[in-house]
Amino acid sequence: MIQFGIMLDRRRFLAVCSQLGLASTLLPGTLYTVAAQAQAADALPSATPSASLPEITPEMIEQAAALAGVPLAPDQISMMLDALNRQRDSYSSIRALHMQNSVAPAYIFDPLPQDATVETQRQSPKYGNPPTVGEPPINLEELAFANIPKLAEYIRTKKVSSVALTEMYIERIRRFNPALHFLITLTEERAMAQAKAADAEIASGTYRGPLHGLPWGAKDLLAVKDYPTTWGAGGFEHQTFDYDATVVQRLDAAGAVLVAKLSLGALAMGDKWFGGRTLNPWNRRQGSSGSSAGPACATAAGCVAFSIGSETLGSISSPSTRCGVTGLRPTFGFVPRTGAMALSWTMDKLGPICRSVEDCALVMSSIYGPDGKDLSVRNAAFNWDAHFDWRTLRVGYVQSAFEMPKHLQETMPAGLSPEQRQKWRKDYDLRRADRARTRYDRTFDLAALDQLKSMGVKLIPIELPKLPYDAMANLLSAEAAAAFDDLTMTGRDKLLTEQGPEDWPNVFRTARFYPAVEYIQANRARSLAIQQMAAIFGVVDIIVVPSGGEQLTLTNLTGHPAVIQPNGIRENDAPKPPAIDTGDEDNIGGPGTPVSITFLGNLYQDAKLCAFACAYQRATDFSQMHPDLSGIGAL
C-alpha cells in the first residue's frame, strides 16, 4: 500500500479501474490515470489532482498487465519500474500547459490515397437559371420554406428586403423555439445590422451572390465574437471568444445574415443540451437526433434559410434524416474548422444543412478552401455547375444493403410499376408477423433504386470493404478525450448534463486507457480502408446506400463526402415509435415522419456528388415536404 492522500491498495486500484470502464490498456497511461483518478474521485468540480503521484509498484504493474492482456514475467516487471515511473511522471509537465481546445496535434490526417490527385483550379460557380418570381406574398411567412435560389431572386430583384426576411425568420424563431428547443442564442442585433447593410449594398448596385441578405443559423460550436459559444454543454454556458470562426467570416463576406446560434448535444453528442432536448418538428415526442440538432430542426421548421452543422460520426446525417432536410457532409479537409470546437482532429467536418441539394452546393461554394490556419484543409476546388451532365457518372449501390430476401424476390408479381412495387413490398412485410422498422424503411430504399433506374441510371453492384470499423472508431474517443482532458482531470465533467455509460464523461474516462500503440494500429487499419475505398471509386463515381449503418462509420473514417436527403414519408401503416426514444436509431419516427437516402462521392468530388444528388431530388418531390407546425404557437 502507498500513502497518497488515500491508501491506494490493490482493492482500491481495481475498484477505480472498474469505475472507469477499463477493458484494455498499456501500462504507463493506466498507472498514471488510475492514480490520478483515485485521488480526484471525490473532488469538487473545480479541484485539480496533485502534481505528486504514488510510486508505481510491481503489484500495480502486474494488475495493469493482466487487464491489458500483456504477459509479463516478474523479471520483466522489475526491469520496467524505473522507466514507467519516469514516463508516468512526464505526463504532469504536459498537463501543466493547460492547452486550449483549439490547439491541434502536430499531425494532420490526409484522406487521399497514394498517387491521388485533386482539381485545384477554381472556377466561378455556374448557377441554375434563376426562378421566376412575381410579387412577394402579402404574408412573408409563405416564403419560410423557400429554397435559396427563390429567396435570393426576391432579394436580388429588391422585391423583398433582407430586413423584412430577417424579421420574419426571427419572429418564427421566437414562436417555434419554445416548443422545439433549437435556439441557444438569438443574434438579433448582429443580424439586423447585417440585413440593413445588405439592403443598402443591393440598392447601390452591389450584389454579392445568392447568399446575400439570407438569414442563416450556426451550430453553437462555431465562435462568434460578442456572443456566447456554449458548445451546448453545462459549464460552458457563458464561454466567449474574441473572434469569428472562419466559416462565419466567409458567410459574412458572402453577405449572409447570422440570426441564431443553434443547439447541439453537449460537446457534440446527441440532441440533449444544457437547455433541454431539441425535438423533431415532425414528431415532437421524439428528439431531433444530433449532434447538429438545432441546425436540422430550425431548417426543417422554416426558421432559417439554411444552417451550418458539423459531423464527426453521423452528426449531419442523423438529424438530417430525422428532420427531413438535406445535409452535405463534405470531404474531410475541404472546409476549414478554425474557430470550431474540436472533438476529433482527424474526423471533424463542417457542412451545410439546407432544404435542397442545390442549396447545399451554393453554401458550400462560399465556405470551402484553405484559410492558412486549419492545416488539414487542402487546396481543392469545389466547382459547382448546376448544368453538369450527371449522366456521365458511374453509379454503384451497396447490393447487400438493398437486397430483398430471396422469398420476396420470388413472390413479387411481374410487370409492376415502381410505385406498385413499393406498395407490394410494404404490404408483404406488413402481412408478416415481423413488423420490424428496418424492414418497413427498406421499402423506401428499394424505391430509390427503382427511381434511379427510371432516370436511366445503370446501377453497378458493389460491396464495401470488410474491416473492423467499430474498433477503428475508438480513434474518435481517444482524440475527444484529449480535446477535453481538463474536464476529466479536474472533475468538471460532472457539470455535463448527461452522465450515463455512453455519455462523454464516461467515454472520456474510458478512453484514457486506450493504448497509444493500439491508436496507431487503428490508424494503420484506417489506411487499409482508404486504399480499399479508392479501389471502389476506381470503378464508380457515386455510391447509393441507405443512411446510417456501417457505411456511416466507414466513410467518416476515410473522409468521403456524403449527401443525405429526404426520400419519403412513413405512412399510417408504419410501425409505431417506441415509448422512449434513446436517440440511438433514426428509423423509429412512426407514421408521418421522414426517411432519407444517402449518396456517397469520391474524395474532393463533392460538386459532382451534389450534381447527381440534385438530379435525384428534382426527379422526386421529397424536398418539398414540410412538417405541420399548425399546432405550435399562434399562427
Image (cartoon, grey):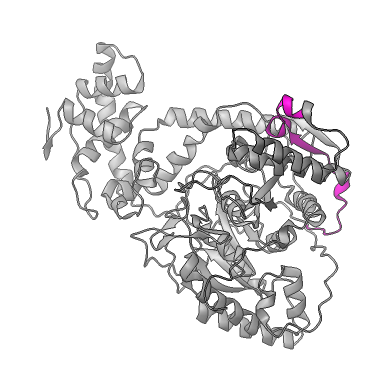
Residue 507 found in image quarter? top left
Left or right of 116 on screen, residue 314: left
* Residue 212 can be seen in this image: yes
* Residue 184 can be seen in this image: no
Q: Is residue 303 above or below residue 496?
A: below
The residue lying toward the viewer, choosing from 183 and 334, is 183
Task: Please name the residue shown 64% across and 33% down the image.
Answer: 432
Residue 565: % across, % down = 69, 52
Residue 387 drawn in magenta: yes
Residue 467 drawn in magenta: no
User: Which residues are the magenta region?
Assistant: 384-409
Task: Please name the residue shown 40% across and 30% down the image.
Answer: 515
Badge count: 0
Left or right of 94 on screen, residue 546: right
Residue 202 found in image quarter? bottom right
Residue 353: % across, % down = 63, 59
Residue 158: % across, % down = 75, 85
Task: Please name the residue shown 21% across and 43% down the image.
Answer: 41
Q: Quadrant of the C terminus?
A: bottom right
Residue 167: % across, % down = 59, 82
Q: Is residue 137 above or below residue 533?
A: below
Residue 38 found in image quarter? top left
Task: Please name the residue shown 41% across and 68% down the image.
Answer: 240
Q: Is residue 441 above or below residue 406?
A: below
Q: Quadrant of the N terminus?
A: top left
